[in-house]
Amino acid sequence: MSDRKRKICVVVASRANYGRIKSVMTAIKEHPNLDLQLVVGASTLLARFGPAINVIREDGFEPDATIHYVVEGETPETQAKTTGLGIIELTTIFNTLKPDMVLTVADRYETMANAIAATYSNIPLIHVQGGELSGNIDDRVRHAITKLADLHFPCTEISRERIIRMGENSEAVFNYGCPAMDIALNSNLEINNEIMESYKGTGDPIDWAEPYLLLAQHPVTTSFGNGFEQIQESLYAMREFQGYQKIVLWPNIDAGADEVARGIRSFHENQLDQNARFHYFKNFSPEDFVRVLSNAKCCIGNSSSFIREGSTLGIPVVLVGNRQQGREHGNNIVSADYNRCDIKQKIATQLKADRYDRDSLFGTGNAGVQIAQKISEFPLPTTKQNTY
Amino acid sequence: MSDRKRKICVVVASRANYGRIKSVMTAIKEHPNLDLQLVVGASTLLARFGPAINVIREDGFEPDATIHYVVEGETPETQAKTTGLGIIELTTIFNTLKPDMVLTVADRYETMANAIAATYSNIPLIHVQGGELSGNIDDRVRHAITKLADLHFPCTEISRERIIRMGENSEAVFNYGCPAMDIALNSNLEINNEIMESYKGTGDPIDWAEPYLLLAQHPVTTSFGNGFEQIQESLYAMREFQGYQKIVLWPNIDAGADEVARGIRSFHENQLDQNARFHYFKNFSPEDFVRVLSNAKCCIGNSSSFIREGSTLGIPVVLVGNRQQGREHGNNIVSADYNRCDIKQKIATQLKADRYDRDSLFGTGNAGVQIAQKISEFPLPTTKQNTY
Amino acid sequence: MSDRKRKICVVVASRANYGRIKSVMTAIKEHPNLDLQLVVGASTLLARFGPAINVIREDGFEPDATIHYVVEGETPETQAKTTGLGIIELTTIFNTLKPDMVLTVADRYETMANAIAATYSNIPLIHVQGGELSGNIDDRVRHAITKLADLHFPCTEISRERIIRMGENSEAVFNYGCPAMDIALNSNLEINNEIMESYKGTGDPIDWAEPYLLLAQHPVTTSFGNGFEQIQESLYAMREFQGYQKIVLWPNIDAGADEVARGIRSFHENQLDQNARFHYFKNFSPEDFVRVLSNAKCCIGNSSSFIREGSTLGIPVVLVGNRQQGREHGNNIVSADYNRCDIKQKIATQLKADRYDRDSLFGTGNAGVQIAQKISEFPLPTTKQNTY
Amino acid sequence: MSDRKRKICVVVASRANYGRIKSVMTAIKEHPNLDLQLVVGASTLLARFGPAINVIREDGFEPDATIHYVVEGETPETQAKTTGLGIIELTTIFNTLKPDMVLTVADRYETMANAIAATYSNIPLIHVQGGELSGNIDDRVRHAITKLADLHFPCTEISRERIIRMGENSEAVFNYGCPAMDIALNSNLEINNEIMESYKGTGDPIDWAEPYLLLAQHPVTTSFGNGFEQIQESLYAMREFQGYQKIVLWPNIDAGADEVARGIRSFHENQLDQNARFHYFKNFSPEDFVRVLSNAKCCIGNSSSFIREGSTLGIPVVLVGNRQQGREHGNNIVSADYNRCDIKQKIATQLKADRYDRDSLFGTGNAGVQIAQKISEFPLPTTKQNTY
């Protein structure tokens, strides 16, 4: 076993997952002692999310397996069932691929499915982005995955310390920064119409050279049932800023996504003002998403990228609601309630701020290679030991 | 909502589960402000485990649903799939029963299935027996469930403190002792042939009035593949004690159970000595199990009951292997390796010890009513908050 | 058993299912010797189909269970997985409801899931709409369900004979006509803006008093991958008829639905003509759908309702492609290829025809009560016997 | 596509399946224009059935995937769920292996799972052993699979005609005899202790050179609940024949298997007569099973092999109960009720008959190569057409 490569199975199960782990995938692929096994599943395959599988393939990654396991409905019930179905499917695939380690990212239900399939299959588990706080159901899932994992790559120092305080062995917890920042800090951030030509979107025409606001607001699963109104508060607040174009991202697949989408559609259909300049997109490649984010005059919503990439690049953000409650962030963040007046006021404040200093809280852009190197060296655990 | 009863759904998914939670079920059923919803599933329904569902019904509990979801095979792969299938099934049932809270017990994969189904269904989760250490895969699963749960009933003071150290809010963590001890400390422990008449078992005839050794040794999932030899070391060690009858319990349904069962069968078929006096049982009711345990001259194996009930009642135990590694226990425990000579020597030591003092480490016999009362009062959480 | 009511479990698993079986559900509910058990699942619950569950509840039917089991993706792979997940879920529900008979409708994969869950659960199976021919994968599924069923209610005489030729016992096969025709023949078919006020749809404003064409074209699963172009041929053909409004129904959930939907969206976004007068709807109640169909000047596409309700009411139809190949129909049908010129020409022909005579091929409007009566009398089978 | 080999995926999902299809697997493997893809799943992997996977590997077949999907319990409910889980798992595997055709055998629920997974995945389906009659639930499942299949290889002339009468295109239905007979007619049938040395079994010692009776009696799923008594009638009848050894095979995994197994165990434990000479086996390789069958003085029970191999080789059989009702057979069969007196009398009759003439009803021993050749030539269907 000593002179064969370690097989590391990465499961990409949502568009957000991919951007967060891409630099690690590249580093594993290029590492002399590691073999990358890639499983692409769940919403990554779904057309209505602008299938991320296409982006992954264009980036030169060929999946060992693609698996559908999203139970449709976007309710709490279907989130749970998707987790169950994912465990069943991934177990069969792990049994075929026989990886030495499985890598799982962050805190979603697909992440939990990977973690449980690997744990009960006796395959050591690597967890990236553990130890953070964000409010919402994600907190408990993220920490539960920490307790299942053997090797941890948190993205901040405070997260590293929290994982150790939760009883994990400090010799298995390493902070090399967030791999998503590898893209943010090493990409060309220029934006213009030519570069963005391939993204069609819907709504009014957009001129990428002109100033714009960016909205990315996902459903909050623990307040399932309020998404329709929550998104509309943000949309009506943005409409007040007539001098700006508005770019709106469709929500992810969490419980409540349908409500949020209905909220957006209802807002759009009731627009009387032909010059409101709203534009709607499903998906960007990780690099192009950073472009869009970094050139926004202000970001509005609750996407965790606003905190990570936003803090790293110093982008003004109005953080709406409690989905990211408690998460560490730079001083680029101003919080607002689900209230159009409050949101409007905070946007105005941030537009005055223009840009913030870059913050190295989430790393300095070389997480991927360091994580891959550590994975190649880490002694394969047999039985996990807690420190207490 | 204030003047209707809270619906508390208890999921019993293994024979061991039932003994651990029975006194809580009784207390919930009898509490004026609580309604008991009972789901019985997984190995509790399987004939080859001496179906525990019959015992449950005889005790006066009528299930709201019985659900098969064990994927057969007893490999790591099928444990994972059972978890996945359990999540799917339990989600549908929770959606039908609409409980206010779901209660899950201990650390097995069926327990994990309950926990995830409840968590993603946005139903507050109660966890009993969290915070312990035991070695094996159970540790990480138990702690992961802790991170998913809203209300915790650990069974020892050290477990309570560990849960709080893991970041749970101390106002949601209560140590009332272990509900399994409610049975051990409030039952008639007398044993004789008349009382035990209904249990047939197989093997040589047994006389319950005569001295016996008791073996209960479950597969260790993280060393899947060694169960055949591990059990035989214990069996051959016991055979040396010709003055005693030997009672052997068939293993539970964990990955590797089939190997352990084969080890027992192979041992039995190769017995030449007609007077070895080995007797094999599948299952006892919780009360009768305590009888059998408390009258044993020495218990051998790795059942957690040897530590809990054994410590509480002062029964000499030879703990074999590392399945319970790190678990708190009384001074009734002597450890041994998977080695017949070592085990034999430790049995001899324990037979000399005869009995130990009772230890109140796991409580004083009134956990069930205290837990039910706390469940009735606890403010229903909306979003769980960690302390850090 | 003789003096208790028979429990008949109807599973409604798609919007189309409901219209087809509603009059039977009503008749079972009102029958003195029958109890209706209702399970609503699959796409009936999904928002993007304009959830039919709401219509069902408004009609006074309260489900005993609602279950999500659509695996998202609309590919052949996800159709198969939906069938598998449906079997698992329905088995658990049948085990809880313990019906005397299960009723399943037509030929879709959800129908197959009901049929298999009932068959292996040893519950006698009633099949409505068997014995027809239509081309596509539906043929083989429909006939397979026939071979699983115990009691058959085909909708035409030829279908009845075909079922018997396939080896079914003629004493278990009854043609009372199609229950969907009970609605078509007993409803008020008047249409105006007031009646249709609650249906918003999208696209250009519609005036229900003005003449319109109706398009309903579903994906053809055996030619998965061509849906985008197939639908566009019909849309471009319809656009030629400037004197008419055009009503377009979104496709059902079969494999390929996403392609068809993309075809519609792409067509719509590329419209330059502001006066094309296209209007898009997701869903109507069964009664209102008949209204819309019966007042159309011409129906275009491949919906089976065009053949059933269309023939019964004498509505001109241009049947596009081979999805309904071989199905019996009245003389109201003209066939066309997936070719905009051919379709255009056939529409012109049908517009001249205006209306056809009503055809009683699919019954005379009292199927529901006759079916319920037969269900109440039919000797419950133990073991099914073929005639050869 | 013209000059690459066709990939034919065979799914072996029970020990019985393997013996029935082995000669076809060999012929596919050796055919110049075919590639064999092998999936081994369900009870083939389970230890308590004497895992057939080992026999398959020893025969030189290496599976492309092994998949657990048996839901444990052996009730009607778990049969249904196993079918559902099998569909999910096989769909994922078919999507990975991308076969040109899938081959499924006979009439069990695992067979149905293959059939549905292939059908909805748009993969042409080959069915071997269709068109027969046997009573039990198997009839309807077998005929349903016929209606799903594209290419049929029935094993008798009457079966071929029945398939065509059910509406299948006669140009897709070929009778080359039963592939299981390829083994029966081309094997060395000699038996002695040396050859059979590797089979241990349990019970009394056996001398293969001495005369013996053979019992193989499976649960009858449509009379779930009576298996315990049904098997005991046969066992008590056999006990009367003191001059013979008795070989008993454990039942397969159908609903009710557990009852049958309990019936056998209860009979065995209540044996007072030390000389009853009962011997119990789990499994033989297909070749050794034919040896055991062909050397039996009389076969008792309801195994379909008694009809197939029994008729082909002229072995006296007492067919008990209605599980094979209506199945074609040679004149070697005498039927008996579930009644020990009736069975005893029929055994006595058959022992006098000694041997019957061989019957070529099920073929002449070269089915495998003919089937493989036809598979290589058959035009790949796009849309299946019925003849009416």
Image (spheres, coloured by chain):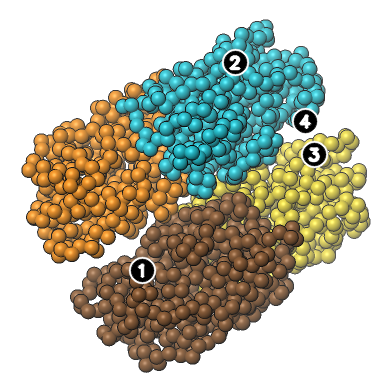
Chain colours: A yellow, B brown, C cyan, D orange
Q: Residue at x 57, y 44 (%)?
A: C69
- C311 in relation to A286, above or below: above
Give the CA separation, mark 2 to mark 4. 27 Å
Q: Is residue D240 visible?
A: yes
Asked whether B62 or C231 is in front, the reply is B62
On the picture, is B109 further left or further right than B163? Answer: left
Q: Which residue is mark 2?
A: C312
CB contact under 8 Å: marks 2 and 4: no
Pick the quarter of the image with the N terminus of chain B.
bottom right
Image x and y of residue B259, in percent: 35, 66
Name which quarter of the figure residue B113 lies in: bottom right
Question: Residue at 63% of width from left, 18% of height from top?
Answer: C185
Instruction: Identify residue for label 3.
Output: A266
Residue B322 found in image quarter: bottom left
Mark 3 surroundings within 10 Å by alpha-carbon count, few (fewer than 14), some (14 through 19), many (20 or more):
few
Are the residues under badges 4 and 3 in a single subunit? no
Return the disc, 2 or 4, that comes first in the chain's sequence. 4
Q: Amino acid at mark 2?
A: Thr
Which three-letter amino acid code belongs to the residue tagged 4? Answer: Ser
SS of the residue under disc 3: helix
Secondary structure of residue under mark 2: helix
Q: Which residue in the protein does label 1 denote?
A: B198
Mark in front: 4 vs 3? 4
Mark nearer the viewer, 4 or 1: 1
Check disc 4: other Cα within 10 Å, few if <14, some if 14-19, many if 20+: few
| CB atoms of marks 1 and 2 within 8 Å | no
- Residue A353 lies, with reference to residue C98, above or below; the image says below
Between circles 3 and 1, the one closer to the viewer is 1
Question: Residue at label 4?
Answer: C198
Mark 2 to mark 3 CA distance (whole Å): 38 Å
Distance, label 4 to label 1, CA atoms, is 67 Å
Against B247, residue C370 (above or below) is above
